[in-house]
Image (tube, rainbow, N blue to C red):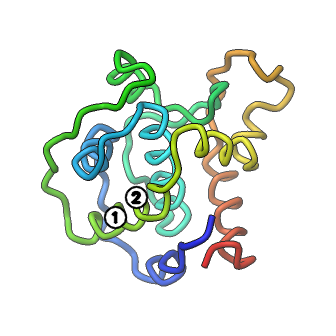
Amino acid sequence: MGKVIWLSKMGEEKMNNIISNVETIANYFLSEESMTPKKLQKVCYYAYSWYLTLFDDYLFDDGKFQAWVHGPVNVVLYDKYKRYGWRNIPMAVKPNLDHQLTEFLDMILNTYKEFNGDQLENMTHNETPWIEARWGLAPEQPSNNVINDITIKNFYYKLMEDGQVE
């Protein structure tokens, strides 16, 4: 994963109960770069997961991530962007967000932007939160099992503690 040195430092300061919605977070990422729906899903998942881990709060309150075949999926995002299929979603207008939140989102995007949707899918497939939510399912079996927030927090906190992020 590499370059997430900012995580432990950022987690020292609690944000001011910033809760947005998943579409606003997606629009922020899309204002920075055009990407496929799959990549957008995974970047939003990582933003959700790291925010939950670092600040013990929800980044957005509209929908949890489900353990779909191709990795974590937020149904709200899926419904909005499914028409793009494997094509890039056009750039969006940058939403007006709190400075602390934009700093956090920039760090997430800078950490994961070098990966494409397939690479991010493979990363999530090797992580406990998605694996646990898919337990007992065949690889191609559809699922709407919700990825557990406690498992997310424990997994990413342990990554940070073990120094697997810089």
The answer to whether 131 is drawn above or below residue 114 in the figure is above
Residue 15 horizontal/vertical position (percent): 34, 71
The answer to whether 88 is drawn above or below residue 82 in the figure is below
The answer to whether 102 is drawn above or below residue 79 in the figure is below
Query: Is 53 left, or right, of 127 in this rendering?
Result: left
The residue positioned 16% from the left and 50% from the top of the image is: 94
Element type at marker 2?
helix
Element type at marker 1?
helix
The residue positioned 46% from the left and 61% from the top of the image is: 51
Corner quadrant of residue 89: top left
Disc 2 residue type (three-letter): Leu
Residue 144 horizontal/vertical position (percent): 62, 22
Query: Is 151 left, or right, of 38 in this rendering?
Result: right
Query: Is 83 left, or right, of 119 in this rendering?
Result: left
Local packing at callout 2 (Cα closer than 10 Å; few below 14, some 14-19, many 20+) is some
Where does the C terminus fall, quadrant-wise? bottom right
Where does the N terminus fall, quadrant-wise? bottom right
Question: Residue 106: which disc?
Answer: 1
Question: Residue 96: which disc?
Answer: none
Corner quadrant of residue 120: top right
Disc 1 residue type (three-letter): Asp
Residue wearing tag 2 = 109
User: Does the residue at mark 1 contact the one at mark 2 (Cβ under 8 Å)?
Assistant: yes
Residue 101 horizontal/vertical position (percent): 29, 64
Alpha carbons under labels 1 and 2: distance apart: 5 Å
